[in-house]
Image: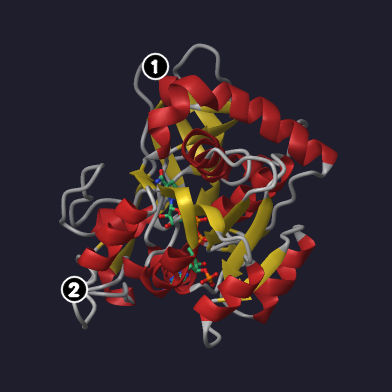
Amino acid sequence: MSTTALNHRIRLAARPHGEPTADDFVHDAVEVPSPGPGQVLLRTRYLSLDPYVRGRMSAAKSYAAPMEVGDVIVGGTVSEVVESAADGLTPGDTVLGYGGWQEYSVEDATGLRRLDPDAAPVTTALGVLGMPGFTAYAGLLAIGRPQPGETVAVAAATGPVGSAVGQIARIHGARAIGIAGGERKLSELHELGFDAALDHRAPDLAGRLAQAAPDGIDVYFENVGGAVWDAVLPQLNEFARVPVCGLAANYNATSLPEGPDRSGRLMGTVLAKSLTLRGFIQREFAPRMFADFLRDMTDWVASGRVKYTEDVTEGLDRAPETFTGMLRGRNLGKTIIQVS
Ligand code: NDP
């Protein structure tokens, strides 16, 4: 690498209180690192922005360790190999890695997946053919288990997870109800083939949901929690399944919502309707389902049975505002930063 090349990075400056602000991020530039044995130097082409990163910015313990203040913000990346000290990878190869919010990264070759740019646009490895698509596939099929004729509902329904959930549900013969924020997203849901599309920002979501699901809801794929969950709960059928995938409505919350304790009502409904609520982290299912996912989803995308939208913003510098916008719902489809 030329000694003058710099690696521009974005690091965590402070743990956000509520919605992240510009002050929570610091931009800097350091010398480009060199790969050690078994490693490669990568130049980031595309960076994935994902809601879970908000959780990693907090100190709270979760399924993965939090970032430390000063760390480069984490994230999945599609990158080009610039220098290789590993067998099997050569400069010019395109790989899926975990380089984070920076222009260059050094990674162990064993953690990388080589991508074939002729097989599918490489950005799909961050969305429909990557972790979000797999999350939809595994959570829906292993936990939701939709049956022909059943009704499946999902919120954040135009995002990479939700849009795949609805389309896979339809492939399995179920009706799909998508819940999303705003007119633009409702049109998108109709384009994607959802049977009904509901705006969670308009009044009386519960009433509109009851109309859209006259036979009740058999599978609710939980991406958001909050007011949407409150509207869905009374519509769930006996033996309904709820894969609990994410709670986007809570990610920036700094306190519990006001009002009476509703856990009694929740547990009463779980009991009376014999509901299954099952949380999951997608990687649990990777060993037994990832190969099937890649085969099925690649076919479905190629045949047009699963459509996808990507929301690509140019420039690493814009990652913080784009990330905050995604948590607010400003994105349409998979949120990606084009870095170089
Ligand atoms: P999205 O691209 O769909 O972005 C998040 C969306 O959440 C926003 O666009 C917004 O959509 C919606 N949202 C935000 N606040 C609210 C609210 N108060 N009420 C209703 N909707 C809200 O994200 P992804 O598709 O990448 O991820 C979807 C979910 O899946 C997230 O919760 C994420 O954390 C989770 N996830 C979980 C994984 C796991 O292994 N368990 C793996 C990957 C993702 P809108 O404008 O429609 O409201």
The disc, 1 or 2, on the residue closer to the chain's N-terminal end is: 1
Where, by quadrant of the figure, is residue 41 drawn? Answer: top left
Q: Is residue 126 above or below residue 289?
A: below
Extreme residue toward the front, this view: 272
Q: Nearer the viewer, residue 291 or 273?
A: 273
Q: Which element carries disc 2, helix, strand or loop?
A: loop
* Residue at the far right in the pictured view: 303
Q: Position of residue 186 (x, y in %)?
A: 68, 73
Disc ID at residue 261? 2
Local secondary structure at mark 1: loop
Report the residue marked by disc 1: 38
Q: Is residue 250 shown to the viewer in this render?
A: yes
Q: Which residue is found at the position 21% from the left and 82% from the top?
A: 258
Q: How is the image coloured?
A: secondary structure
In the image, residue 219 above or below residue 92: below
Please state which of the two labelled residues, at mark 1 or mark 2, is closer to the viewer.
2
Where in the figure is residue 332, as x and y percent of width and height?
Answer: 62, 66
